[in-house]
Amino acid sequence: MKPQNWVNPLRDERDKRLPRIAGPCGLVIFGVTGDLSRKKLMPAVYDLANRGLLPPGFSLVGFARRDWADQDFGQQVHDAVREHARTPFKESVWARLAEGLRFVPGSFDDDEAFARLAKTVAALDEERGTGGNHAFYLSIPPAAFPTVTQQLAEHGLAGGDQPPNVWRRVVIEKPFGHDLASARELNRVVNAVFEEESVFRIDHYLGKETVQNILALRFANQLFEPIWNANYVDHVQITMAEDIGLAGRAGYYDGIGAARDVIQNHLLQLLAFTAMEEPLSFEPSQLRAEKVKVLRATKAVGPFDQTTARGQYAGGWQGGVKVRGLLEEEGFAPDSTTETYAAVTLAVQNRRWAGVPFYLRTGKRLGRRVTEIAVIFKRAPHLPFDHTATEELGQNALVIRVQPDEGVTLRFGSKVPGSTMEVRDVTMDFGYGHAFTESSPEAYERLILDVLLGEPSLFPANEEVELSWQILDPVLEHWARSGKPEPYAPGSWGPPSADAILARSGRHWRRP
Ligand code: BG6
């Protein structure tokens, strides 16, 4: 085995053709029988292996309350990979990955199970050279975090007295609490066992190529920066719409709702990337400093009964299929006030953005699945045309299409060919499909690799999570005091109160 501090003399850090490959390590997944693990985590591990980005001795340990042997777990991983992996299935890659699969049965409060886990991990270090480096992925309800982190600490798995070149990391999934107070408590519990630099909080939106590209678009180009401010921007709309409902997700979603599920994390991160100042460098600490600064300047604008909206999908027809309303979905309380649609108005209170509303909306069972950021520009101050010539001219817009149909669209006015002057909106388009031959990795591929590399740029820090709750809490408190969400038809674009938010200032939501 090569010594830990061995450096490959042929490898030059500046050579971008060399992919970053994780060093010796293993990954332990708690909650391995869950949906996330099956659909995203296990397939992402395979995709990384297939791309040659995992070390040869890489090991994956599953921990769950199932009476499985290693082979049964292997079969589960195999099925998940066959069904959900992005890259083609190769027997040779699979065979190698399968050698490092282990399963530890047990519940979170079972001391013996954690002792077995510690033994399994130590054996992997011996047999497969994982070098003591292990990441623990908590794909479990936050209520179980205290028990699991405590067990890891008690069984010597959390690090502590490891040699300095050996690492232990913990990966946690949202929701990080349900308000500021509970998030603080959760962070306290986790930080009692893992120091902050070993904690990787997943916001899978940051793993998306199109989200990372916001930084390239803004900071690698000269074109956009001069107009990226309140002098030119009228308002910003950030939309994350889904056409699916919540069947099967009551356990997680009832009582949580759209604002906590999506706005508190994904959409506020999109806002931070869109509105932040240029970081001094892409050093993780510099990037975080700018995100924290912009989140600290962000406030929810009231009065909330005019500037926010929440809805709940009703039953009806969507795309020719009869669907249930939320209240009839299995597992939801028949009088549930959980919102499946949420819209808020935010202000970024600094010189760049003063007076520019940021409208954020998200919902289930909407017209179609789409996530986009639309920066809508002010109208030209003077139009030297007859009024009739510009009737069809809207506002210029730059739309970052996060998904699907990933790309960027610029909308502006152009003369319609002919003998009269008539100006109408046209678009200029960048699509990933046309511009690049390589397909984008899945968000979880990038993020799991970054955990194993110890690269924290794409993980929200403690402070960002708490600031995001601070922004949202006043709205959530207002909603808790005031009635119920408004019903909306499946396949629509949300409740009428959402349209009213923008209509008050003569604006309207884009139809994505
Ligand atoms: C998750 C939410 O974070 O993101 C889900 O909990 C949502 O409710 C999902 O469906 C959407 O992710 P994506 O990558 O498909 O936009």
Image (cartoon, helix red, strand yellow):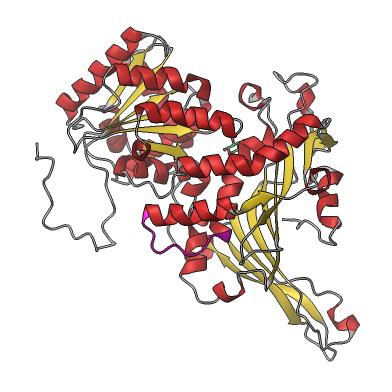
The answer, for residue 437, to whether it is visible in the render is: yes
Residue 51 drawn at (x, y percent): 32, 46
- The prevailing secondary structure element of the residues shown in magenta is loop
Residue 434 drawn at (x, y percent): 52, 65
Position of the C terminus by quadrant = bottom right
Residue 28 drawn at (x, y percent): 34, 27
**Which residue is rendered at x = 48% and y = 19% of the image?**
144
Between 178 and 507, the one lying in front of the other is 178
In the rendered structure, does residue 278 fall within the stretch colored magenta?
Answer: yes
Residue 387 drawn at (x, y percent): 89, 82
Q: Ligand 1 sits in which quadrant? A: top right
The answer, for residue 319, to whether it is visible in the render is: no
- Residue 449 vs residue 399: left or right? left
The range drawn in magenta is: 275-283
- Residue 506 vs residue 454: left or right? right
Instruction: Count numbered badges in the picture.
Output: 0
Between 379 and 324, the one lying in front of the other is 379
Q: Which corner quadrant of the image does residue 363 belong to?
A: top right
**Which residue is rendered at x = 79% and y = 34% of the image?**
313
**Which residue is rendered at x = 16% and y = 25% of the image?**
127
**Which residue is rendered at x = 51% and y = 66% of the image?**
217
Q: Which corner quadrant of the image does residue 191 belong to?
A: top left
- Residue 357 vs residue 306: left or right? left
Q: Which corner quadrant of the image does residue 1 belong to?
A: top left
In the rendered structure, does residue 211 fall within the stretch colored magenta?
Answer: no
